[in-house]
Image (cartoon, grey):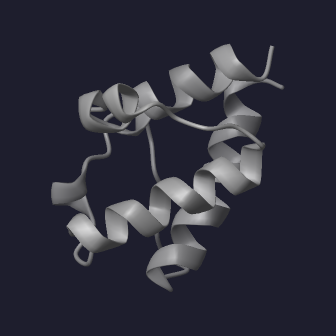
């Protein structure tokens, strides 16, 4: 799977979790960029991403992610 394909799937997940079809994420997207992205929605988002890609993030990865680009990097590592 390419990085572009990962972002296509991430866009679908973000749009579903936040119920906003206008969301388009990129490497630099953070919680500050999406209005309803709070700590509770973060948990929902992580679970939805894990389900979508069939992976599990470690607690260190979840707390260490600074932006969506880092999330994509971890996903790409896991699905190789």
51 or 14: which is nearer to us?
51
Query: Residue, x 60% and y 62% (percent of image)?
Result: 48
In the image, is 64 to the left or to the right of 79? left
Residue shown at the point (78%, 43%) measured from the top left: 54
Farthest residue, direction left: 32
**What is the quadrant of the C terminus in the image?**
top right
Residue 49, position as x, y percentages in the image: 60, 52
- The answer, for residue 37, to whether it is visible in the render is no
Q: Residue at x 32, y 26 (%)?
A: 60
Classify the position of the N terminus by image quarter: top right
Residue 13: x percent and y percent? 61, 63
Q: Is residue 50 positioned above or below 77 on the image?
A: below
Residue 20 vertical position relative to residue 64 in the rendered view, above or below: below
Residue 18 rendering spot, x and y as whole percentages: 44, 78
Q: Quadrant of residue 2?
A: top right
Give coordinates of residue 12: x percent, y percent.
66, 64
Residue 14 drawn above or below residue 5: below
Is 12 situated left or right of 62 in this image? right
Question: Is any atom of residue 25 visible in this view?
Answer: yes
């Amino acid at each position: 799977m390419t990085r572009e394909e990962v972002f296509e799937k991430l866009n679908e997940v973000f749009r579903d979790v936040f119920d906003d079809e206008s969301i388009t994420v990129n490497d630099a997207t953070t919680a500050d960029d999406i209005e309803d992205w709070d700590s509770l929605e973060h948990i929902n988002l992580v679970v939805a991403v894990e389900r979508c890609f069939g992976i599990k993030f470690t607690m260190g990865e979840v707390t260490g992610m600074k932006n969506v680009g880092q999330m994509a990097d971890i996903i790409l590592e896991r699905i190789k």
